[in-house]
Image (spheres, rainbow, N blue to C red):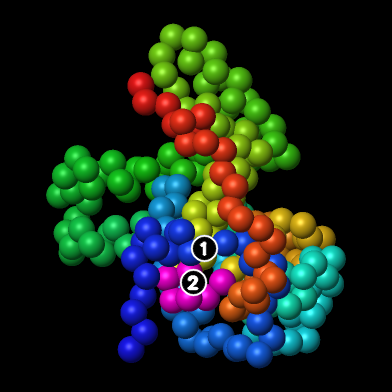
Amino acid sequence: MKIEKTVTEAISYRRSVRIYNQEEEIDTKAVRKCLENAVLAPTSSNLQLWEFYHITNKDVQKKISTACFDQPAANTAKQLVVIVARKNLWNKRAKANLNFLTKSFGDKPVEEYDSKEKFAITYYKKLIPSLYIDFLGALGLIRYLVFNLVGLFKPVYRQLRNSDMRIVAHKSAALAAQNFMISMAAIGYDTCPMEGSDTLRIKRVLNLARGAEINMVIACGIRDPKGIYGPRFRVPFQEVYKEI
């Protein structure tokens, strides 16, 4: 039985591999399991505004590779995973959270909810819509201006524009992507997150909804010795670590 790497070992093992061994296949079920780990990543307000497209079909993979400019990581990958941010699903995901909470609180009337339970319900019924409902960016801008005015007198949440909420969705998707890549490294599989791509073409290949946004494409396989282009470089830790 293959022993999985520890978290620290997996993080150290993970490199952005740009050329994959063409003789070695990877197990689709194992990759899917790593994607199951991806959905356990932290996510803003537990909205889980993401989707994961696991590409095993060679014809589809070729089209996506072309959209990734046929860079070696995409062209030699055995499988691909496309991480998609779905900010436009906020209402559906908020309702899913509400349904889950209502069931977890038990079969009792609303009047019997305690203060924490009432807050949780209000959070998804009122606060989340107040953040995500927008019209051509106008409502978000108004919220931004009002809250920054209030912020002159007390701490407030300032990420209120449509562009800010898009960033929130992409941050959550990126956290899930990292969960996936570390999980792959733990079982000896390699990955390469790719931002260089024609995202519109990828959306068309996958027939994605208009509101869906490509977060990144991840190449998957087993590294070829030439697949790592050089030794790992990181800025000295003391330059980025600040203890206060």
Give how far across and how far down residue 193 sits, in percent.
64, 61
The residue shown at (59%, 78%) is 222
Give how far across and how far down residue 153 sits, in percent.
44, 9
> In what element is the residue under mark 2?
helix
**Circle 2 sits on which residue?**
184
Whether the magenta-drawn stretch holds residue 239 is answered as: no
Magenta span: 184-190
Crowding around mark 2 (Cα neighbors within 10 Å: few <14, some 14 to 19, many 20+) is many
Residue 80 left/right relative to 241: right
The residue shown at (54%, 56%) is 173
Residue in the foreground of this view, choosing between 90 and 205: 205
Crowding around mark 1 (Cα neighbors within 10 Å: few <14, some 14 to 19, many 20+) is some
Amino acid type, callout 2 = Met
Amino acid type, callout 1 = Arg
Task: Kindly indicate the quadrant of the structure image that contains residue 66.
Answer: bottom right
Residue in the foreground of this view, choosing between 102 and 149: 149
Residue 132 left/right relative to 230: left
Task: Kindly indicate the quadrant of the structure image that contains residue 71.
Answer: bottom right
The residue shown at (17%, 59%) is 108
Residue 225 left/right relative to 207: left
Q: Are marks 1 and 2 in contact (CB under 8 Å)?
A: yes
Whether the magenta-drawn stretch holds residue 189 is answered as: yes
The residue shown at (49%, 10%) is 152
Residue in the foreground of this view, choosing between 66 and 49: 66
- Cα distance between the residues tagged 1 and 2: 8 Å
**Circle 1 sits on which residue?**
14
Q: Is residue 107 visible?
A: yes
